[in-house]
Amino acid sequence: MKMKKSVIALCLSASLLAVLPVTGFAEVNIVPQNTAAAPAIPASALQQIVWTPVAPSQTQTAVLASAGQSLNAPGISGKVAAWSVPANVGELTITLTSVADKQRSVFAPNVLVLDQNLSPAAYFPSSYFEYKEPGVVSEDRLEGTIKLTPALGQQKIYVLAFTTPQDLQQTTTMTNPAKAYAKGVGNAVPDIADPVARHTADGTLRLKVSTNSASSILVGPLFGSSGQASVTVGNTAAPAQAYSAPAPAQAYAAPAPASVPAQAPAPKAAPVLNDTEAYFNQAIKQAVASGDVDKALKLLNEAERLGSTSARSVFISSVKGKG
């Protein structure tokens, strides 16, 4: 099941769907925005799920046998794990790990990412999560890293992990521990058989969330890059009222970092001078073009504080590649 793949740069919104491939060495091309390939889950079922909050720099472990939730939807087998992640802290890097157990079985995860209104935004099938050999402090596992850039104005996005009937019919070939040890110490690798892990409907999942304030929204092709592109989650225009998820028993109250609010200026500011507005609009375009989206966001905030009525539309069109 070990596969190499390429991931595309994309932007998902009601008004934008830009997709261009990254150069890669692919046996399987993963297209995250193709959520039509994911199981169709009724909105009412999603609203019944308890989403466990995960803060940046935090790792949450879910043992599905005891802590998994039931989700009655075609194409989903066994229990699911569900997390909510802050969407107002910039680009998110999410690493999902499925740990193989000693009985040589492993949960083959699929991940559906939903925006703040529980609308599907990206889908990562089980083929995205590669087998990783055990190390000094790590186990046999299936693992994948997902980069997400929440669109402006969202407070949370949602991550759902599950397996499918098709996954349960498959297996994963692992590395024999003797081979892993020989590689680790630089010895000759013995010619012995590798164990095969069956896929099961439960397992242990770990979700780690980190942020990178220097990252930018990726739109269009990444020429010369072989890394995974960021997926923009949610509408880049002013968002609708967000879905309010049921709170878990012991919810983590994530700190509220500075973010770019949806356009809702309070008291009316005096109209900004034309020259000033033109200056900020040009500076926003240049910042986005150079990949410095953080700077563009700061310029947007300052321009709107001064009364600009066009800075936000300039920022959005620039991010979409129309600036």
Image (cartoon, rainbow, N blue to C red):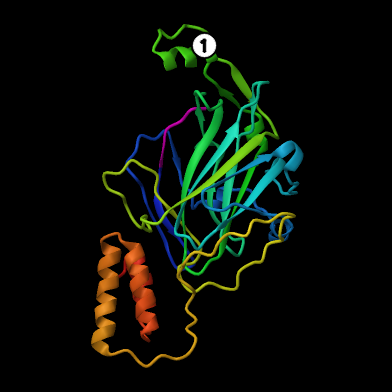
Residue 203, picture quadrant: top right
The amino acid at mark 1 is Ala
- Image position, residue 10 (x, y; %): 41, 55
Of residue 286 and residue 166, the one placed in the foreground of this image is 286
- Image position, residue 61 (x, y; %): 64, 41
**Neighbour class for label 1 at 10 Å: few (<14), some, many (≥20)?**
some
Position of 144 with respect to 253 (left or right) is left
- Give above or below for 290 relative to 127: below
- Image position, residue 152 (x, y; %): 47, 67
Of residue 271 and residue 322, the one placed in the foreground of this image is 271
Q: Where, quadrant-wise, is the C terminus in this rendering?
A: bottom left
The residue that appears at 34% across and 63% down in the rendered structure is 293
- Give above or below for 28 relative to 10: above
Of residue 137 and residue 45, the one placed in the foreground of this image is 137
- Image position, residue 42 (x, y; %): 69, 57
Tell me the SS state at disc 1.
Answer: helix
Residue at the limit of the structure toward the bottom, as seen here:
270
Is residue 37 within the magenta segment? no
- Viewer can see residue 129: no
Residue 141, picture quadrant: top right
Residue 119, picture quadrant: bottom right
Q: Which residues are magenta?
A: 1-6
The residue that appears at 40% across and 57% down in the rendered structure is 213
Which residue was labeled with disc 1? 178
The residue that appears at 27% across and 47% down in the rendered structure is 223
